[in-house]
Amino acid sequence: MERSAGAIIRNKEGKFLVIKGKTGFWGFPKGHIEADEKIEDTVKREVKEEVGLNIKLSAISKSIEYLMEKGRKRNTLFLAEAKTEKITPNEEVKDYKWLTKEEVMKILSFDDLKELFCEMTKK
């Protein structure tokens, strides 16, 4: 099974970062877990590569599994705080926005991701 990891990132104003990837779907920064790489290291590396942010991970994480053309994929997302503010998107990121929780729920492309986001951000 292919595995990826990423982050639901909150800034100082309490808004969340969503990105539009090269496939045109709205979601969160994430990427493939390399062999012998800790999942937390993957998250920090992928966020830095995709949007240029340094983040602080929380202990809260959840995974979702879905079927892709190549087989099953598991994506694990961590709740994180932005330690830096300047976004520098790479070529994989077509657009990005800082949004309120309500706005995030309207823009996310997939229902299972909306459900995961709700679970992880409720207080």
Image (cartoon, rainbow, N blue to C red):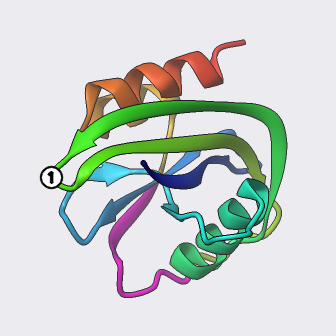
Residue at the extreme bottom of the image, as rendered? 91
Q: Quadrant of residue 25?
A: bottom left
The kind of secondary structure element at disc 1 is loop
- Residue 91, given in percent of the width and then of the height, sits at 36, 87
Q: Is residue 11 left or right of residue 89?
A: right
Q: To which quarter of the image does residue 103 belong?
A: top left
Query: What's the residue at 77%, 70% (across, down)?
Result: 54
Count all numbered tags in the image, as a single digit: 1
Residue nearer the viewer, 2 or 32:
2
Residue at image coords 46%, 42%: 74
Q: Residue furthest top?
A: 123
Residue toward you, 99 or 53: 53
- Examine the rendered structure and indicate whether residue 62 appears above or below residue 81: above
Question: Measured along the vertical axis of the image, is residue 1 above or below residue 113?
Answer: below
Q: Is residue 5 magenta?
A: no
Q: Which residue is label 1 attached to? A: 69
**Residue type for callout 1:** Glu
91 within the magenta span:
yes
Q: Quadrant of the C terminus?
A: top right
Question: Which residue appears at 68% of the width and 42% of the height?
Answer: 78
Q: Which residues are magenta?
A: 88-97
User: In the picture provided, is 100 more to the left or to the right than 19?
Assistant: right
Q: With respect to residue 28, does 115 lie above or below?
A: above
